[in-house]
Image: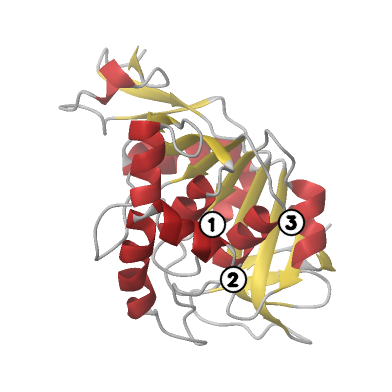
């Protein structure tokens, strides 16, 4: 487990047509390079899962890789809408996209339940919303101890979980720090996982607050420098704000997007 390999080999081995795939990272350490490799390999009919799908999911959807999106928020952060996502939902281009919408708390708890080996999670977070009327995977549940009506959501267990981190050692142990979101839970919840990292180092140096993923919980580790760009990797590079702004114009136009795809 935790085998060090190439990005191309890991994606070719793990991500098959029709798979359920979660690429996670919140603001920081988003596995963009892995998403681009999925596009290059022409995967189709994927169910994509992510708490906050941003431009890499817009790109995957526009490239025709996805048939369904499970999420809690979608947008080009700090800029506006995801236009390829909107085109797929509203007009079915390039293929129709099914959506399953949850709250942030619901998605985080679904990943946590999957990581813990539980069938579902329970929370209060959906009260006052109409998501239950639109999403079949949100159900009321009565607490057997207090009688309070709460909300249950099923665990998420992706076929493949993909995250990005700062570094790993040759044995495949991974270290990440900064805003870490639900990356650990995604790896633990998934049937197989890929961690792309900025670099492979001889030995991991302990850091306060860092999360270490031992090699026995990961499937593949691949060195992909700048693999989170245009998001940032704390200690390596900053967020490329211009890229997000430029993406808005590219994604608005099908022809401009099609030309962009040729650059991958």
Q: Residues within 10 Å of mark 2 (few under 14, many from 20)?
A: many
- Residue 118: percent from left, percent from top: 57, 29
Toward the left, the furthest residue is 128
Q: Earlier in the sequence, mark 1 or mark 2?
A: 2
Between the residue at mark 2 and the residue at mark 3, the CA separation in whole angstroms equals 13 Å
Q: Quadrant of the C terminus?
A: bottom right
- Residue 81: percent from left, percent from top: 27, 52
| Left or right for 192, reference 129 | right
x 33%, y 79%: residue: 242
| Left or right for 173, reference 206 | right
Q: Secondary structure at mark 1?
A: helix
Q: Quadrant of the N terminus?
A: bottom right
**Tag 3–tag 1 contact (CB < 8 Å):** no
Q: Which mark is residue 218?
A: 3
Q: Earlier in the sequence, mark 3 or mark 1?
A: 1
Q: What residue is shown with label 1?
A: 183
Closer to us: 61 or 167: 61
Between the residue at mark 3 and the residue at mark 1, the CA separation in whole angstroms equals 12 Å
Q: Which mark is residue 165?
A: 2
**Tag 1–tag 2 contact (CB < 8 Å):** yes
| Left or right for 75, reference 196 | left
x 30%, y 71%: residue: 245
Q: Residues within 10 Å of mark 3 (few under 14, many from 20)?
A: many
Closer to us: 94 or 131: 94
Colour scheme shown: secondary structure
């Amino acid at each position: 487990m935790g085998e060090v390999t190439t990005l191309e080999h890991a994606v070719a081995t793990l991500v098959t047509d029709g798979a359920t795939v979660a690429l996670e990272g919140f603001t920081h350490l988003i596995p963009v390079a892995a998403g681009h490799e999925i596009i290059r390999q022409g995967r189709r009919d994927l169910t994509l899962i992510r708490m906050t799908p941003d431009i890499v999911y817009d790109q995957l959807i526009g490239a025709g890789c996805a048939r369904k999106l499970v999420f809690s928020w979608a947008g080009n952060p700090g800029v506006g809408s995801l236009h390829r996502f909107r085109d797929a939902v509203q007009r079915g281009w390039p293929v129709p996209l099914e959506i399953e919408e949850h709250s942030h708390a619901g998605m985080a708890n679904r990943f946590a339940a999957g990581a813990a080996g539980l069938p579902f999670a329970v929370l209060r977070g959906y009260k006052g919303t109409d998501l239950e009327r639109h999403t079949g995977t949100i159900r009321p549940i009565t607490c057997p101890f207090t009688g309070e009506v709460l909300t249950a959501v099923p665990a998420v267990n992706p076929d493949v979980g993909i995250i990005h981190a700062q570094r790993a050692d040759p044995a495949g142990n991974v270290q990440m720090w900064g805003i870490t979101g639900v990356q650990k839970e995604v790896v633990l919840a998934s049937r197989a996982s890929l961690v792309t990292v900025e670099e492979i180092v001889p030995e991991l140096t302990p850091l306060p607050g860092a999360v270490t993923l031992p090699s026995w919980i990961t499937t593949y580790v691949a060195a992909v420098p700048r693999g989170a760009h245009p998001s940032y990797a704390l200690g390596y590079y900053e967020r490329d704000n211009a890229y997000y702004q430029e993406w808005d114009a590219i994604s608005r136009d099908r022809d401009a997007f099609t030309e962009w795809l040729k650059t991958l």
